[in-house]
Amino acid sequence: MSSSALDAPRFPVWRYAGRLLPLAVLWAVLVGLLAWLLATRANWGEESDRADVREWLDNTRVFRKTLAELVREFVDLHNTEERGPDHGDRVKNKRAELEEHLRAMVEPTRMYTGQLPLFPNVYSLEIEFSGVTGADTRPVEPIVWTSPKPRPGGSAKAQLRTLDFEPPLDRPGARARVRCVYQLHSFNRMQKQQDEFRFWQTVATGVLVPTTLIAVFVVGRFVRREQARELEKWRAAAEAEHRERDLLAAQVERELIERSLLEARVKQQELERSSEELGRKLLEQELAAAKLTNRAAEAEREALEMKSQLYASIGIMAGSYAHNIKNLLVRPNDLITRCMEAAGNTEQHGMLEEVKSTLGTVTERLQQILRTVRRDPANAEVTQVDVYALFRETQRTWAEMGRDKWKVAVSMDVPPGAALVTGDLSHMQQAVENLVFNARDATFEMRNYLRDEAKRETDPTARRHKLLDAASWKGEIHLTAHRDREHVVLEVRDNGIGMTDEVRRNCLKTHFTTKRDNALYEGYSAGMGLGLSFVAMVLEHHGGSLEIDSAPLRGTTFRVRFPCVRS
């Protein structure tokens, strides 16, 4: 074994440097370009500030004219050949207008400095004229506005900037120059410097970091490749001299590696089993915790839902009772009006007796309402109620009102005898009357629809016939009751406007209503959306059910089922 073959390989650094020289030159060019951009960024900011001030001078309008337009008019007024006796006054007025324009441009920026932190501080504005003469051929004096605020002194004086702006004139030989002396707001300059610093910091980072990383990657890859080549040569020489020894060492090393791999696999399998067992236990604990959390959340949700339903039921009931009290007071008011208009003491006496009886009924109903409101709707005052008698009483109570006031025929078809159900009389009475009132409102809507259709008719003859049909149309409310095995079925049918599928799906929701304010309602305002929701609540507490058969312009039938009292 020769020592030359076993010596570590030597890598020629100079050869590597020669190959990497183009990459180093490219990286140096990029760094130099970035440095040049950073050095010239201050000039860019200066030009941007001057462009902003020039745009302000060129585009600001005070008397619906820009400064350039006023200067052009002033020059044209001086150079015009048609000079009347009032030419001097016109020149003075135009000069005053220019002075006022300058003051109006700068005054807001001076007065609202705290509210315009990004606008520069303007110290003077001057308009100089050349090639423009007055009436006595003397040059026109400059127009100057000077800020009452003193100019900064000392080191701050170097921050003042002067901008010369020449508006275009149509007069050959005439020139006007607007000179503005201003100082950029310190906050504006600081913000711009910070923005420029952040921008160029981002640019520098975006350029230097990727290029440096690429250069490092390329250099490293190049060095590794060259090292690999030199090592390959060295290994080839060593293998040629020590092939047998290397083969034996390779076999021994392979056996050791296989043994190490086998031990590593055994340990890895043990770790995987331990990890799976630990994961299974953690999953079981998380599942148990999730179940407990879900149970607690479900219990809390059910409690909140029960409480909200209780409060909603109380609110619905109170609103429904107020709704019914309003309807009960209609009849006494109507009777009192008729008593005042009737002739003869006998007729008035009879009407007053009817008023007294009706008000007695209202008083009794109010007592029932007060007793009902004070107790929980779920804890109703349960008795045996004759629903046949309830339907007959409802028809008697509202038939005359329907004929005289509503212009609706309230009829019934109730078999003789009694049909007893278990429930709260006051609640059931309110529910039935709510169905009657809903049918009444549906007939009002139908009559209103027929009148609207007649008004939309363009043919006079057809329109007259439709108006007569609408005037002769009469609403009908029919109450029907019968037994169906172990249930009593109560039906309230009308020939009103009917319901669409969407209205039928939502009509039992609280505060859902389709009623409108209209003269056909005879003084009844739009619904509150409480009547049918109260009916649904009563049926729920009494074990009843409600079916609704309806179609637009075909009327509606409300079918209520109550379980009968078993003998």
Image (cartoon, helix red, strand yellow):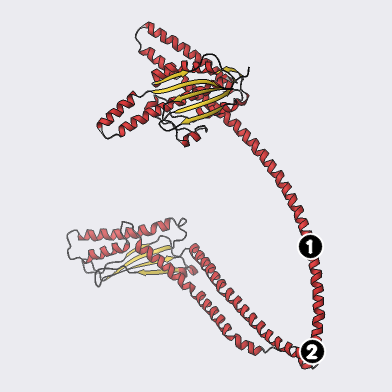
Q: Is residue 563 visible?
A: yes
Q: Position of residue 381 (x, y in %)?
A: 61, 20
Nearest the camera: 505 or 361?
505
Identify the residue under disc 1. 271
Q: How many marks?
A: 2
Q: Residue, x 50% and y 30% (percent of image)? A: 548
Q: Where is residue 521, by image quadrant?
A: top left
First in sequence, mark 2 or 1: give its number: 2
Q: Position of residue 423 (x, y in %)?
A: 59, 21
Viewport quadrant of the N terminus: bottom right
In the image: residue 281, left or right of residue 350: right
Q: Residue, x 47% and y 63% (percent of image)? A: 185
Q: Amino acid at mark 2?
A: His
Look at the picture and state if 402 lies above or below 248.
above
3D distance between C-alphas at marks 2 and 1: 42 Å
Q: Residues within 10 Å of mark 2 (few under 14, many from 20)?
A: few
In the image: residue 253, left or right of residue 392: right
Q: Is residue 530 visible?
A: no
Look at the picture and state if 36 lies above or below 159.
below
Q: Position of residue 425 (x, y in %)?
A: 57, 19
Identify the residue under disc 2. 242
Q: Could you tell me which secondary element the residue under label 2 belongs to?
A: loop
